[in-house]
Image (spheres, helix red, strand yellow):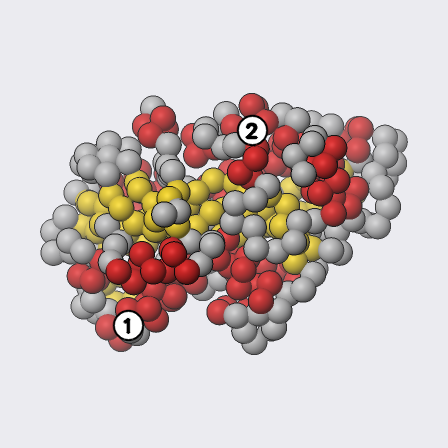
């Protein structure tokens, strides 16, 4: 059975032309990486990649920025519109965008989408107030639940789960659409009974929710979840380690996706090559930039959760390294 591994080590808690190859002394090429909310790991992924790329701007001519965005779906839509050159997206949303299904059904298949590499595992995480009476995922029915902001991967995954269970928004007492950065405070202010987040761990928002008020992490299990992971290569059973968060001493089983780094065929091979090289030739430095990166493995990063074809620039670098 596929299983995402979350490391317990972490308990220690404007676009220039992309058509030509960047060279030393050449005019700078500006690239924009779509990330997510500032409390999530996507933001750290983008900032970390840009940090490594920008160390050698004088060499390759690329200047990278990674602003906070609405998340996976928003990033993929921005790539389609040419508003971003690269972005971070959940593995399931990468698949959906490529095939024009789910949140991308109206726009149709995104044939120009290309994978670059995968990053960290992202368990689907449910945190509930201890006084809410929520002990299982099904107990969310009739409660006040933050289902996530439109455009985020967590919202798309929650929408999928609601359809799987035959739920609608009307089944909740309240279905709020707060951004990730807002939901922990809303939980501890007793404005919602539970929050959901598809995110790498450890995560600052989950840490805030589990230290600022009395909460518990809720398992997401069942035959339908097992079948979901078995039938879809971009889902896997996942475990959130016990002791990672305050008052949550036991392992919690759920399922999850992988964070993936994506681009399009409109971005030149040379630009993607330079970005990939910046990450993998500074791999140990990259892994130290967030605890969720601690167990990253190069071989897994060029295969896991990648539904779209690899970008030619990534293929070029991986081939040079003898990985393909």
Q: Which quadrant would residue 238 be assigned to in this image?
A: top left
Which sits in the foreground, 48 or 68?
48
What is the spatial separation of the Cα atoms under label 1 and label 2, in whole angstroms? 40 Å
**Quarter of image, res 77:** bottom right
Q: Is residue 25 visible?
A: yes
The vertical placement of 35 against 230, above or below, is above
| Side of 98 relative to 149 (left or right) | right
Reply above or below: 293 against 194. above
| Residue matched to label 2 | 286
Residue 3: horizontal and vertical position, in percent?
37, 44
Percent across and percent down for residue 19 are 84, 50
Residue at coordinates 41% horizontally, 60% vertically from top-left?
Answer: 231
* Residue count near mark 2 (Cα–Cα under 10 Å), binned few <14, some 14–19, many ≥20: many
Q: Is residue 187 visible?
A: no
**Residue 68 location (% of width, % of height):** 53, 48
In this view, 307 is above or below 323: below
Q: Secondary structure at mark 1?
A: loop
Check disc 1: other Cα within 10 Å, few if <14, some if 14-19, many if 20+: some
Q: Which residue is mark 1?
A: 167
Q: Please report whichever mark, 1 or 2, sits nearer to the chain's N-terminal start.
A: 1
Q: Label 2's element? A: helix
Point 33% across, 68% down: residue: 164
Compared across the picture, whether 155 is left or right of 14 comes to left
Q: Quadrant of residue 80?
A: bottom right
Q: Which is more toward the observer, 33 or 322?
A: 322
Q: Position of residue 6 (x, y in %)?
A: 37, 37
- Looking at the picture, does residue 239 appear above or below residue 124? above
Q: Quadrant of the C terminus?
A: top right
**Which residue lies at the image location 65% right of the left edge and 58% below the top edge?**
113
How many labels, in total?
A: 2
Q: Is 259 on the left-hand or right-hand side of 50?
A: left
- Residue appearing at x 31%, y 56% in the figure: 226
């Amino acid at each position: 059975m596929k299983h995402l591994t979350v490391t317990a080590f972490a308990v220690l808690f404007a676009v220039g032309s992309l058509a030509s190859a960047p060279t030393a002394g050449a005019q700078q090429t500006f690239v924009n990486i779509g990330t997510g909310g500032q409390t999530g790991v996507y933001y750290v992924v983008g900032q970390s990649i840009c940090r490594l790329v920008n160390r050698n701007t004088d060499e390759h001519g690329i200047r990278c920025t990674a602003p906070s965005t609405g998340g996976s779906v928003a990033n993929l839509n921005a790539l389609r519109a040419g508003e971003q050159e690269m972005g971070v997206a959940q593995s399931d949303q990468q698949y959906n965008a490529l095939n024009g299904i789910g949140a991308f059904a109206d726009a149709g298949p995104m044939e120009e989408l290309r994978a670059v590499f995968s990053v960290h595992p992202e368990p689907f995480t449910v945190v509930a107030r201890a006084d809410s009476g929520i002990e299982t995922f099904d107990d969310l029915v009739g409660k006040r639940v933050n289902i996530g902001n439109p455009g985020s991967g967590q919202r798309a995954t929650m929408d999928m789960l609601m359809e799987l269970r035959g739920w609608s928004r009307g089944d909740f007492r309240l279905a709020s659409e707060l951004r990730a950065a807002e939901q922990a405070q809303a939980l501890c202010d007793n404005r919602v009974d539970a929050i959901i987040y598809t995110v790498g761990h450890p995560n600052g928002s989950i840490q805030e929710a589990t230290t600022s008020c009395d909460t518990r992490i809720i398992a997401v299990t069942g035959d339908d979840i097992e079948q979901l992971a078995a039938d879809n290569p971009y889902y896997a059973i996942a475990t959130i380690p016990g002791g990672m968060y305050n008052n949550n001493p036991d392992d919690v089983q759920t399922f999850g996706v992988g964070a993936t780094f994506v681009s399009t065929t409109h971005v030149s091979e040379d630009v993607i090559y330079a970005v990939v090289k910046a990450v993998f030739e500074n791999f140990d430095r990259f892994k130290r930039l967030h605890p969720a990166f601690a167990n990253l493995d190069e071989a897994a990063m060029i295969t896991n959760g990648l539904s779209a074809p690899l970008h030619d620039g990534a293929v070029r670098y991986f081939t040079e390294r003898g990985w393909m």
